[in-house]
């Protein structure tokens, strides 16, 4: 084994411990969201952006804040509102101490290259102009302003939206949703003990105090890009698992070719598009990161099973005639694909 | 008197001769001039014509030699009347001399008149033109009168003993068929022979009861065959695939390592083999996904043993049920 490979393996082992620490730290703050936190950690080690969606008051914002605080680095937050414009993210104007008008850098530019997390709360309340700016920030990790380009190499965008309220909201365009590596649906915990804990334990009454109580910056955020590269290069994916991953993606696009049946649905006309090159690449990357987090050196089908819903659900676009029950149909489609495609 | 008679004879004779000559010359001059007209015609029978019949008329016409037929003057094909169709009209120059030319004209009609009793009808007159450089002459083919007959009787009397009014038309004769009884027998004999041979071949190859075998029995036979090629790297992967297929078939869906608990819950007959099943999935992961396993004959034996055990357990469960 070469020294480089050995160093890389040691690096992965060291980092695995830190990833577990991060996971534990978030789990201590947020109750009953272990699966979502697992997936968020996968996304963090793939350097993918995350969109959280869920009912009102289930802890989306708290979870994202806790994750951002645990990750460390410079953190910025903005609230999505109907009058928010792209320039509000880049600069703001004010009267300076000397009484003259001044222009200062906005939340995106304030920390320069050290910006680690950009947290966009209630993203669907912002206008499409703002979504458009985010497209570039998420895809290229850069933005142009004041006649120059600013780069954010460590940037990860966390966003959330509530799924109940639709008034004065703007649906995220497909291109923007595709740039989020994962779209996670948060539900409230169902276990009685957890609900009682959330109900009666005073620790959970004050979200600010709760987040302050957890450890901060448990990871050196500026090394995350390197470790993400190391994970992708060190975790093995055999020909058999590559075949499996390929057929999973194909079956999601063309279920009729794999004999996947969904009751009362014409699968031939069901899927209009989805799981393009970015989506399939995210699936493979997250499967590798999941394998690493589970202390394996190679990807197995279970890694795909663990991440496929978070990666593919928001990337599958179905025929509008089925939109009345779209979410359930997509869920059924993914289950059908997982039950049908064998490996080996 | 005699002198007068003689004088009369002297004067009258030359006059008579001159008149005769004049008449002769005039007749000869008239005989040289050819008249345009129909010389000969063939029109077929003009009775007993039924709806849909094709009527063909041939005319031989003559014209002075300097005239020639104008092809565009022939009537165009198409409907002449609501019941009469001109299918074709053509011509042919059949003889030519210094004095005259003879053309043969051919008209083909088809009648669609459907009379209920015998009806007299006529084709319309047709005109054909002939011209020289500066003169034109027209020839009219006269109308042709004929009678059309109905296809069936107006007051049906029935056919033979059948007095039914609707049955006065005779049924078509059934076509005579070629006897195929011998051929049928030969085909049956051939088919049965082929079937017997196919069954014999399937039983010799061991495929005869393949569908009735349990999935693990099938996997056992496949692994046994692959064991012979244990030196081939892909043989072990194929053997693992065969066992995976057996699990998938029994589970009714693709079965993965993390689902084995549910599988055993559903198939209690395998509960005693949980460890062996888990070991198989671990072996499969090492070989197919980690690619760290170099298979040996022992690994094939392990697969064969598992297949045998699971097939046995399945058989036992079937007997009990």
Image (cartoon, coloured by chain):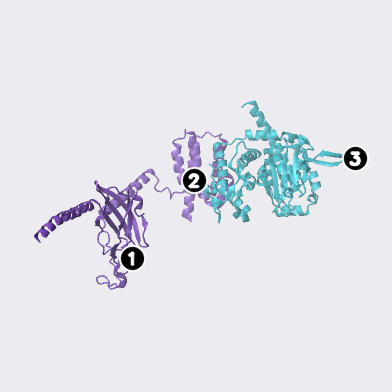
The location of residue A299, given as percent across then percent down, is 60, 39
The location of residue B88, given as percent across then percent down, is 33, 54
From the viewer's side, name the closer residue of B19 and B95: B19
Dot 3 falls on a residue whose secondary structure is loop
Marked residue nearer the N-terminal end (2 or 1)? 1
From the viewer's side, name the closer residue of A46 and B214: A46
Q: Nearer the viewer, mark 1 or mark 3?
A: 1
Chain letter of the residue carrying label 2:
B
The residue that label 3 is drawn on is A99
Question: Which quadrant holds the N terminus of chain A?
Answer: top right
Q: Is residue B242 visible?
A: yes
Seen in the picture, residue A170 relative to B85 is either above or below; the reply is above
Q: Which mark is residue B114?
A: 1
Looking at the image, residue A265 sits to the left or right of residue B76; the answer is right
The crowding category of the residue bearing disc 3, from other C-alpha atoms within 10 Å (few below 14, some 14 to 19, many at least 20), is few
Q: CA distance from mark 2 to mark 3?
A: 88 Å
Q: Colour of chain B?
A: purple
Mark 3 and mark 1 in contact (Cβ < 8 Å)? no
Chain letter of the residue carrying label 3:
A
The crowding category of the residue bearing disc 2, from other C-alpha atoms within 10 Å (few below 14, some 14 to 19, many at least 20), is some
The residue located at (50%, 43%) in the rendering is B243
Chain letter of the residue carrying label 1:
B
Dot 2 falls on a residue whose secondary structure is helix
Q: Are marks 2 and 1 on the same chain?
A: yes
Q: Are marks 1 and 3 on the same chain?
A: no
Q: Which chain is cyan?
A: A
The residue located at (71%, 54%) in the rendering is A164
The location of residue B58, given as percent across then percent down, is 27, 55
From the viewer's side, name the closer residue of B258 and B60: B60
The residue that label 2 is drawn on is B309
**Quarter holding residue A98:** top right
């Amino acid at each position: 084994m070469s020294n480089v490979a050995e160093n890389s393996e040691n690096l992965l082992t060291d980092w695995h411990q830190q990833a577990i620490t991060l996971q534990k730290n978030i789990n201590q703050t947020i109750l009953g969201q272990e699966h979502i936190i697992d997936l968020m950690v996968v996304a963090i080690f793939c350097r993918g952006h995350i969109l959280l969606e869920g009912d009102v008051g289930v802890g989306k914002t708290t979870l994202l804040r806790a994750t951002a605080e645990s990750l460390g680095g410079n953190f910025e937050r903005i609230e999505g509102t109907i009058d928010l414009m792209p320039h509000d993210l880049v600069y703001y104007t004010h009267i300076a101490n000397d009484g003259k008008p001044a222009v200062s850098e906005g939340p995106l530019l304030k920390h320069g290259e050290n910006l680690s997390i950009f947290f966009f709360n209630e993203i669907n309340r912002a206008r499409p102009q703002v979504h458009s700016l985010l497209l570039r920030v998420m895809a290229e990790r850069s933005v142009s302003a004041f006649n120059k380009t600013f780069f954010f190499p460590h940037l990860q965008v966390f966003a959330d939206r509530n799924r109940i309220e639709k008034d004065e909201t703007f649906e995220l365009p497909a291109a923007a949703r595709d740039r989020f590596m994962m779209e996670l649906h948060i539900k409230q915990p169902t276990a009685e003990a957890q609900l009682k804990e959330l109900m009666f334990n005073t620790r959970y009454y004050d979200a600010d105090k709760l987040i302050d109580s957890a450890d901060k910056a448990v990871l050196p955020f500026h090394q995350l890009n390197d470790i993400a590269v190391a994970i992708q290069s060190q975790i093995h994916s055999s020909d058999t698992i590559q075949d499996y991953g390929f057929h999973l993606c194909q079956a999601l696009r063309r279920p009729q070719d794999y004999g996947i049946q969904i009751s009362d649905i014409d699968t031939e006309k069901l899927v209009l598009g989805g799981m393009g090159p970015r989506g399939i690449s995210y699936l493979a990357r997250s499967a590798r990161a999941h394998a690493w987090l589970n202390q394996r050196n190679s990807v197995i089908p279970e890694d795909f099973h663990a991440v496929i819903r978070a990666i593919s659900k928001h990337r599958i676009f179905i025929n509008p005639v089925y939109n009345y029950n779209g979410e359930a149909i997509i869920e059924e489609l993914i289950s059908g694909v997982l039950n049908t495609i064998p490996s080996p | 008197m005699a002198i007068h008679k003689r004088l009369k004879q002297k004067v009258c004779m030359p006059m008579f001769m001159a008149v005769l000559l004049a008449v002769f010359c005039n007749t000869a001059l008239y005989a040289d001039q050819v008249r345009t007209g129909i010389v000969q015609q063939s029109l077929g029978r003009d009775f007993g014509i039924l709806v849909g019949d094709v009527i063909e008329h041939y005319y031989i016409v003559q014209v002075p030699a300097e005239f020639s037929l104008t092809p565009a003057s022939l009537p165009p094909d198409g409907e002449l009347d609501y019941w009469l169709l001109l299918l074709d009209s053509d011509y042919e120059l059949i003889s030519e001399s210094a004095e005259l030319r003879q053309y043969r004209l051919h008209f083909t009609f088809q009648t669609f008149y459907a009379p209920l009793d015998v009806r007299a009808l006529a084709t319309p007159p047709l005109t054909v033109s002939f011209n020289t450089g500066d003169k034109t002459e027209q020839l009219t083919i006269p109308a042709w009168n004929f009678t059309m007959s109905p296809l069936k009787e107006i007051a049906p009397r029935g056919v033979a003993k059948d007095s039914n009014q609707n049955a006065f038309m005779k049924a078509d004769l059934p076509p005579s068929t070629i006897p195929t009884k011998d051929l049928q027998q030969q085909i049956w004999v051939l088919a049965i022979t082929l079937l017997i041979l196919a069954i014999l071949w399937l039983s010799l190859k061991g495929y005869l009861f393949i569908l009735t075998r349990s999935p693990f029995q099938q996997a056992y036979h496949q692994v046994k065959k692959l064991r012979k090629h244990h030196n081939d790297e892909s043989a072990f992967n194929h053997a693992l695939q065969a066992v995976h297929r057996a699990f998938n078939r029994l589970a009714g869906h693709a079965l993965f390592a993390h689902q084995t608990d549910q599988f055993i819950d559903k198939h209690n007959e395998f509960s005693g083999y949980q460890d062996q099943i888990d070991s198989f999935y671990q072996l499969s992961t090492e070989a197919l996904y980690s690619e760290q396993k170099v298979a040996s004959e022992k690994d094939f034996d392990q697969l064969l043993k598992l297949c045998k055990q699971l097939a046995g357990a399945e058989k036992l469960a079937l007997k009990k049920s």
